[in-house]
Amino acid sequence: MATPSAATRVGSRPQRAAPVSESRYDRRLSEILAHATEVFCKKGYEGASMRDLSRESGMSLAGLYYYFESKERLLYLIQKHTFSTIVQRLKSRLESVNDAEERVRVFILNHLEYFLANQAAMKVLSHEDEALKNGFGEEVAAIKREYYRICVGLLDQLKRDRGLQFATRIAVLSLFGMMNWIYTWHNPRVDADATALAGEMGDVFLRGVLGGEAK
Amino acid sequence: MATPSAATRVGSRPQRAAPVSESRYDRRLSEILAHATEVFCKKGYEGASMRDLSRESGMSLAGLYYYFESKERLLYLIQKHTFSTIVQRLKSRLESVNDAEERVRVFILNHLEYFLANQAAMKVLSHEDEALKNGFGEEVAAIKREYYRICVGLLDQLKRDRGLQFATRIAVLSLFGMMNWIYTWHNPRVDADATALAGEMGDVFLRGVLGGEAK
DNA sequence: GACTAATTCGAACGTTCGTTCGAACCCAGT
DNA sequence: ACTGGGTTCGAACGAACGTTCGAATTAGTC
């Protein structure tokens, strides 16, 4: 390798974890990820070329490869970061809420708030679902599975507390559908904000499942 | 043009509309569209190369261009045909149903039945939403708008008949989200069939909106 | 079997793709 | 002023892309 220092850095945190301020490297990488997210959102993963990313981020084509070793790895970094953040925020919010119905509402609000605030990132996450090949995709898929399981847990809790009866899997996936489809239609100039949307979707969904008494 | 006859054929029905049996040309084109749909579904529009399509359909790379003039036009043909069919079936089914709630259920069932029976085609339709550039996409977008308006009409009728109050736009788009998201999770070996799914989704959605009395 | 038109194909076109390489640049510590 | 490592770049690589063209093959009619 001609640039061993680069090779050791790519894909791993800097050796020292201590310093409070991000290193120059970390800051630059974040900027590139942000620009790349926009481009992937606009043109799709396959449709966006490395030259597009170069133009948008203001860095030369070759320069990009100092920060990640391949286009696929770049998509992985974006997806991993985005998804980890949303799961982490959700866990922190859920800690302070006990009522089963309220917890479901927190889930919806957390999802929609992050979705609308980081619309480009979430579109890339939703839309480029199967773009990562063997190994690369596995880790993202694991986070996704965890997120899904959390939602299943919330609905099962609701079912137990209220003695309801409905198919949890279908309910969860319907809820994800309602929320994730937003990236195809939400227009910030026409549509309400996250709080209002979360309220309306929460109303529809919760009335829907709460009505499911034992038949 | 070296092959004017081909040029006149591409993209337009054969001159005579009379004969009952499809021409050899029409039959072959349908086969190619079917194979191309599978490939687009598996690898995405941008990710699928003309050489992939050639391999899958058993026709030479150059041979494909006898049936359509560009890759983009091919995607257009697939989307147009798929979407037209689903709208047409819906209209025919709605003719015999009058009750507002039942009409919404017919809408859901029609959508899910076609979705699951032609999963690949519907995934291409949902996923490659913005792939068609200026002009090409406009016609497909128009059909989509019509389909959307039909659903808005059904829900408005329901609101009027039952004196309900909810945001139609959000309700419609939530319903589309529930239904269209299926392509990301449905597994025919695990999940129920279209009729059962339409029943469950219809229950959740209709209880959700029917609970929306005037506040 | 010969003639014509419809259909198919091999081979190549020019372009763009993701990636690599070595040289240059910048800047802190001396 | 000099050095050395972290950072950036221009130029190029081979491969794959969508598309074209003229010749070859096939199917249909006499």
Image (cartoon, coloured by chain):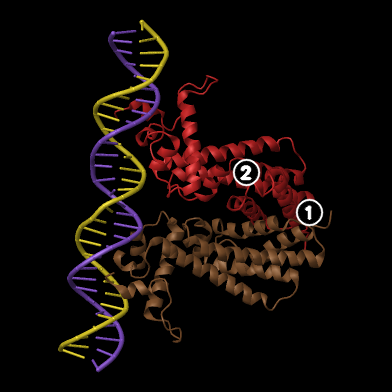
Chain colours: A red, B brown, C yellow, D purple
Q: Is residue B195 visible?
A: no
Q: What x and y, as percent, mark residue B112?
A: 60, 66
Quadrant containing the N terminus of chain A in the rendered view: top left
The answer to which of B81 and A127 lies nearer the viewer is B81
The answer to which of A142 and A65 lies nearer the viewer is A65
Q: Residue at x 33, y 27 (%)?
A: A4
Q: What x and y, as percent, mark residue D22?
A: 19, 68
- Residue receiving disc 2: A116
Q: How packed is label 1: few (under 14 Cα within 10 Å), some, or many (20 or more)?
A: few
> Which of the two marks, 1 or 2, is nearer to us in this view?
2
Residue type at mark 2 is Leu
Q: Residue at x 36, y 74 (%)?
A: B8
Residue type at mark 1 is Gly
Tell me if residue D25 comes above or below residue A28 in the rendering: below
Q: How packed is label 2: few (under 14 Cα within 10 Å), some, or many (20 or more)?
A: some
- Residue receiving disc 1: A163
Measure the C-alpha gap from mark 1 to mark 2: 34 Å
Quadrant containing the C terminus of chain A in the rendered view: bottom right
Q: Is residue A43 visible?
A: yes
Q: Earlier in the sequence, mark 1 or mark 2?
A: 2
